[in-house]
Image: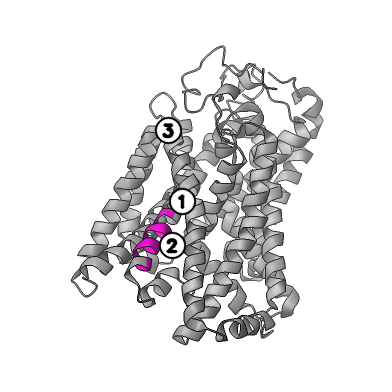
Amino acid sequence: MAHDDLSIKSIDPTLYNEDLAPLPHDKRRWGWFEIFNVWSNDIQSLFGYTLAATLFISYGLNGWAVFAAIVLAGLIVMFLVNLTGKPSVKYGIPYPVMARAAVGVRGANFPAMVRGIVAIFWYGVQTYFASTALALMLYAFFGGEEGATFLGLTAVDWIAYLLVCVFQVALFIRGIDWITKFLNWAGPLVYVVMIVLLAVIWYQAGSGMLSEVGNIFAGSGDYEGGPVMAFVAIVGTMVAYFAAVIINYGDFSRFVRTERDMKLGNFLGLPVSLAFFSLLALMITAGTVVVFGEALTNPSDIVGRVDNIVLTIVAAITFFAATVGINLVANFIPPAYDLANLSPTNISARTGGFITAFIAFFIGALWISFISAIGIAGFVDTLGAVLAPLYGILVADYYLIRRQSLNVQDLFSANPAGAYFYEGGWNKKAMIAFAVAAIFSVGSVWIPALAALSGFAWLIGAAIGGALHFMLMRQEASRLAVPTA
């Protein structure tokens, strides 16, 4: 495999630019540690901490059952991303190019556009949340919490927000090598700071710390539907948390040297890292009950209550870095590629990044005053549900229809005789499979009777999409399976 020729022989500028082109094996620099840090940064955001801590105190389950649910969710996500990551390791192509095999060289613009919209929205939101961590540090130095506000933000909040916006774009401009260095630094440092924060809380809590951990582990058993449904809900919630990255994981795995490195990084970064991070969140939250008299699940609130200026500054910088990390991983790099796929001649990944940052700036700036108050979550969740059938279609197409073989040249060809041109560049059978499956996955957002499925609605929508695509395409499977190019 290391000697496969991935260079494109005949370049169609409407389908090709250097950012979308297959990445040669000799230019790949990532090993298992880089993949591990992709997931570490994805897990370690402010929202990720709050989610992990809340799972232990909101579902009434025994603590060991919560851990089991979190680890199971990590294993499920690991399995899903191993499937989407493998072809990109083999061929060095990002997600929107991979999608061309299943839905057509022109049809791939649709899943790319949907994924891009979801990512841009969350990029703006996470930029705002990253700025709150930086604002925490600025308040520690200069005060200003009670100052006048504009669109719900004080002058300090606006300074922090603008600094985060500029920092993220500057990091992106420096390229994937700088982003990699940032992720490799931020991931381990967050764990160091969390361990220090745990030590400080434990010192203040004294002997009451372990007693409170025991209370949380005992569980109250008051979740509606009983312990089984609580367990299912936790697994579903954690899977849904990673859903956005699952489909476009190839955007990252294309940088990995070997499939073995990818799988090892996925294992250490998902079930292992997820369990360790959740344990730290549980212990710290238990300590806050003893020290402050209430369970604090937001690390910014915890650090703000700890009267230690050095810890406040270090923790603020660290959680800022972690939230920026997930923003780059889940919400910046994906739309940069997706926008480039819409018009490779005019939009490079770098230009796509600028477009992303420009639109997202207004989303983050208006989050407090407007967007968070109008119920925009339904819109975003609907777009996320649209991606579920597309995941199933892409996986079924690669593993069942094409049997893990693609014609790399035809992925970049608009020749009507090409393997992925179909009808005018669109695979209508794939779109039919998508439309039928999307009725269920989108319905899971809006139909109360399906709400109990929680995050599993995404998995079920993917399964339906994949099954329908296989049924519609299986007669062509022998013709479409091609030698590796």
Q: Which residue is mark 1?
A: 186
Q: Is residue 482 left or right of residue 194?
A: right
**Image location (x, y in percent) of residue 256:** 60, 34
**Image location (x, y in percent) of residue 289:** 51, 83
Q: Nearer the viewer, mark 2 or mark 1?
A: 1
Q: CA distance from mark 2 to mark 1?
A: 30 Å
Q: Nearer the viewer, residue 436 or 454?
A: 454
**Image location (x, y in percent) of residue 318:** 41, 58
Q: Which residue is mark 2?
A: 376
Q: Which residues are magenta?
A: 311-321
> Sequence order check: which comes first, mark 2 or mark 1?
1
Q: What SS does tag 2 mark?
A: loop
Q: CA distance from mark 2 to mark 3?
A: 27 Å
Q: Which residue is mark 3?
A: 349
> Sequence order check: which comes first, mark 3 or mark 1?
1
Q: Residue furthest left?
A: 148
Classify 10 Å Cα crowding around label 3: few (below 14), some (14-19), many (20 and above). many
Q: Nearer the viewer, residue 304 or 89?
A: 304
Residue 439, picture quadrant: bottom right
Residue at (38%, 69%) from the top-left corner?
Answer: 373
> Sequence order check: which comes first, mark 2 or mark 3?
3
Q: Looking at the magenta stretch, what is its main secondary structure?
A: helix
